[in-house]
Amino acid sequence: MLNGSGSSSEYKHQKEDEVIIDIKENVERQYCCERLYCCIYKVPKKLRNINNDAYTPHIVSIGPYHHDEEKWDDLESKKEWKWEDMQNLKKGYQVKFFKNIRKKDKLENFVKEEEQRIRDCYEATFEDFDSDKFKEMILDDAVFIIELFLRNYHDDRGDFLVSKPWLTNAIKLDLQLLENQLPYFVLEEIYMLAYGCSARPSFLTLSSKFFGYKEPDGEAIQDMEIKHFVDLRRHTMLVGVEIDEKLPKSPGGKIEDLPSAVKLHESGVKFKSVEIKDAVKPGESRRKCKPEKGLLNIEFEKRAREDSCIWWLRGQVLKIPRLKIEDGTECLFRNLMALEQCHYPFETHICNYIDLMDALINTRKDVDLLVDHRIISNCVGDHDSIKVMFNRLCLEITPSTSCYLDICKRLKNHHERWWNRTKATLISVYFENLWRGTGTIAATILLLLTLLQTIKRFYPALFTDPK
């Protein structure tokens, strides 16, 4: 009897343990599945507190994060449009969209079947969104984006948005905010369901044309897994960038003790701008094109022979792709960096780039130097604002091990060598330009001739032929 009871109790506990294990496995499996799709995040408060405006849409809200009429129309907000105005505009786009394709049922069924996957793409759960409201919002926003991209692609000047470039640019900025996204697979699939494999351009082509950057070629596309527009922008910036596979993937990789641009220049480092092509030239095959340098391709190497005919005047050159600073540049970089902090914490290549630029820029003189060498194109007018922007972009950012570690190490070594600083001083004082260099050489020759004349006067025997 006791043995039977003990056996029953033991069996009961065993069953309970099995149930607990099954629950844990199911929960962990479900969590892993959600994390697998999660790619659209709420910007961390520590980043938002630095510049809240950079993460907030002002013209159009996309997705559930900012889908709130009360907050949108708050009198204290900086929104440029009212919620109802944009909703009416979206409805106008939907009427024309569904009038042309007449496949609304297929699109609704797709969103219905993929609802859970779409929800899993967002970090928040949005329990206040019931199924119907969520599906309607996703479809409305997707149709608006596709129709807008098509009108922009065909340069439809009769369209209200396309006919106003300032408004289109504001929407471009809103569509590249981390919290203001739809999953890319939703947009692609709805576009394909609506138009099929016809002669229309691909959705990637539409996206690239709308945002104004070069469409990645076939080889680059194969390596891409585009999650949304911010992720697409990051991919385009990483095209052609060579990342050392042996680089440790660990946090805490901020660049330290790197001399500023002016100090490096004083030690003989030459700065050179590298132009980035925006498009392939007409008649030029993509396959025959050499791999292009992207914004993140920074190189430190010896100056070419044609840069200087005097070998000892050839210093080291730091090649940096040209960066155009516009009104929306800070906003774009902040959202790219926020994406890396949330989704690519061990591959923060954009953060590493900004960290390097922050190390090079400490004062206005550093900005002046980079502008003079055409590395920075200033379209905001004030050099001080550029300095402040770079110095603030890396606040509360934790970059991974920098992909520029080797370059920074070589720059530091170059700056620490006394001969490099001495040579740079000599060059700046005596060979700053052609006329000063010519004058220096002429003065040196005159000095040598005077010295020889003096020696000949006091020691004539040295210049006579003994017989």
Image: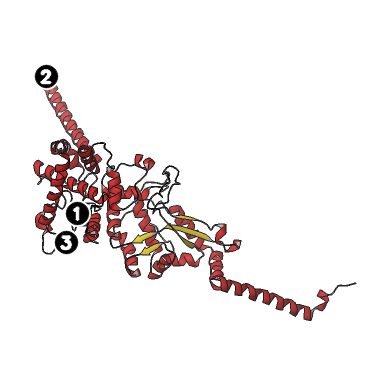
Q: Secondary structure at mark 2?
A: helix
| CA distance separating discs 3 and 1 | 19 Å
* Precedes in sequence: disc 1 or disc 2: 2
156 is higher (above) or lower (below) than 370: above
* Quarter that holds the N terminus: top left
Mark 2 closeness class: few <14, some 14–19, many ≥20 residues within 10 Å? few
Q: Can you give x and y, in whole percent of width and height, for residue 22 in the image?
A: 18, 31
Residue 441 in view of the camera:
yes
Q: Is residue 64 left or right of residue 331?
A: left
Q: Can you tell which of label 3 and label 2 is closer to the viewer?
A: 3
The picture quadrant where one finds residue 55 is bottom left
Q: Which residue is mark 3?
A: 80
Count of numbered circles in the view: 3
Three-letter amino acid code at the position of disc 2: Gly
| CA distance separating discs 1 and 2 | 83 Å
Three-letter amino acid code at the position of disc 1: Asp
| CA distance separating discs 3 and 2 | 77 Å
Q: Which mark is residue 73?
A: none
* Precedes in sequence: disc 3 or disc 2: 2
Q: Can you give x and y, in whole percent of width and height, for residue 346 in the image?
A: 34, 47
* Quarter that holds the C terminus: bottom right
Q: Secondary structure at mark 3?
A: loop
The picture quadrant where one finds residue 16 is top left
Q: Which residue is mark 1?
A: 159
Give me the residue at 24% from left, 49% from top: 149
Q: Is residue 463 or residue 282 the one in the foreground?
A: 282
Give me the residue at 81% from left, 78% from top: 460
Q: Which residue is mark 2?
A: 4
Q: Can you give x and y, in whole percent of width and height, for residue 398 in the image?
A: 32, 54
Q: Secondary structure at mark 1?
A: loop
